[in-house]
Amino acid sequence: MSAPTVEHVINGQRRSTGGDPIDVTDPATGRVIAVIPAAGQAELDEAVAAAQAAFDQWSQTSLTKRAGVLFAFREQVASRRAEIEEIISREHGKTRPDAAGEITRGLEIIEFACGLPQLLQGTYADQLSTGVDTYAYREPLGVCAGITPFNFPAMVPLWMAPIAIAAGNSFILKPSERDPSASLKLAELWAAAGLPDGVFSVLQGGPALVDAILAHPGIEAVSFVGSTPIAKHVYERGSAHGKRVQALGGAKNHAVVMPDADIDEAADHLVAAGYGSAGQRCMAISAVVAVGTEEETGPLIKAIAEKGKAVVVGPSTSEDSEMGPVITAASRDRILSIISETEAEGAQIVLDGRDLSVPGHAEGYFVGPTLITGIDRSSRAYTEEVFGPVLVVLRAADVDEAIRIVNEGPYGNGAAIFTSSGAAARKFQREVQAGMVGINVPIPVPAGSFSFGGRKASLFGDTHVYGREGLNFYTRAKAVTSRWPDSALRPAASLAFPSEP
Ligand code: NAD
């Protein structure tokens, strides 16, 4: 039996194309479970034309009506979340509870967007000058596009589309070709919520489609989330084509553990943050900076190794599984080679996930939790984003050295400190160069009413996603200065720039 075809959604219609096929694989079995015929220029042109026509109507739809659609979409996602979770686990491989967490975070953003009548309120200054009032508000941009990564096939699209659509834009989503089907479910739920055809579209494809989006004159803004080299490419090419671009890239998130921290609790959190979702989270902790002497840091390393060893690795179809496979065979092979290379350089593999076998899943892309100590900071296990269940441990003498280590890295997404010292936490928070900081919180993803974004090689462009910053990204400002004819207030017109208020 041939694998089903993953469709596009253009102007409210599910459609397929004859483009170059891309296989979608179940990472737990290695089997091809779907095929994507990638959209080409013709489908992109059609989707943009439909999105432009839809924008003309949607942007004129009252805020109250738009809010109604957002509320209905929230109910659709909440009541049918199990369907989305099943799709995510099947194509991505993450456990069902992890997929459920992804939907909960996505719902937060929709709930924020439901407040659009208040969020889109402008500002007004009465009698700014005599007889003159000024007011400022924000208008939608037009057709916006989102290009998203494999690791959160529902949450990351939900970081973008609800805010863009609430603001009055239309939105074209190009999901990851590794796990494309959650986007189709989202399109179905938008339609069920009453969103007019063409306001939310989905185009399936890979890099060629991304480049076509970046060059398309009908698209005003592009939100991208993915790896750093592609984020940089998207930012540069999209900007060169005159688009507004926000491009979130990869990460190497450090957790600093002070000797005064609750070691058992810190180890629990580090295991969850390092190995959850097989380390395939942009906010995963991948480097631990253990502060103190060897005697002080030894118990932490021992606790992480013991707890990491106990993690149950298996397919998402098993309720016992706590961690699933990595996304592709290529990803697994790269992770394994990085571990072996680091070992050859003299590092200690304290917990070794290379020889893991999952019964009945010999062809799956599984790697077990891995803990490495004694690494050189020039090692690939440290310089590259491994994006697998691999934690490396570095040592620092004090909080200053720990902060220096974190700041010397090229990325600046998240950074966490575990400590019972307010002074150390405050110093860390103020000096660390990261966009999101956790104090005894390993994965400090801001809630939906705040905004998400890193620094340095983790973000190209200056706006974070969702929350207020997301709303700013999808709107542009207009300031109106108005004077109404009034004989009592008739000003003298002058060729000189006015100097009297
Ligand atoms: P990726 O960069 O390979 O792919 C992301 C998107 O870019 C996909 O839609 C893909 O089709 C497209 N793409 C891939 N190669 C391309 C190319 N050469 N030209 C144009 N487009 C291309 O990322 P991924 O492997 O899907 O996701 C994992 C990465 O995403 C990790 O680096 C992770 O840290 C990062 N990520 C970052 C955040 C964040 O908020 N900073 C969030 C989630 C994931």
Image: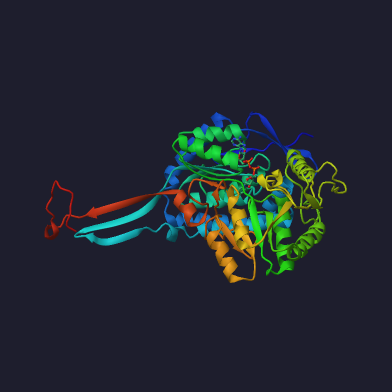
Does residue 36 lie above or below 154 as drawn? above
Q: Quadrant of the C terminus?
A: bottom left
- Residue drawn at x 61%, y 52% is 155
Instruction: Judge whether residue 212 can be spotted in this image.
Output: yes
Residue at 66 percent of width and 44 percent of height: 181
Residue 202 appears in view:
no
Quarter of the rendered structure image containing ligand 1: top right
Q: How is the image coloured?
A: rainbow
The percent position of residue 357, horizontal first and vertical second, equals: 86, 47
Q: Percent position (x, y) of residue 383?
A: 66, 45
219 to 128, vertically: above or below: above
The image quarter containing residue 335 is top right
Q: Looking at this view, is 417 or 46 the one in front?
A: 417
Which residue occupies 77% across, 62% down?
A: 298
In the image: residue 94, left or right of residue 486: right
What x and y, as percent, mark residue 174? 58, 40
Residue furthest right in the image: 359
Indicate the position of residue 274 as horizontal and vertical percent values: 71, 55
Image quarter in which the N terminus is found? top right
**Residue depicted at x 57% and y 61%:** 447
**259, above or below 410, in the image:** below
Residue 121 quadrant? bottom left
> Would you identify the image quadrant in which residue 40 lies?
top right
Total number of numbered labels?
Answer: 0
Q: Is residue 498 left or right of residue 225?
A: left
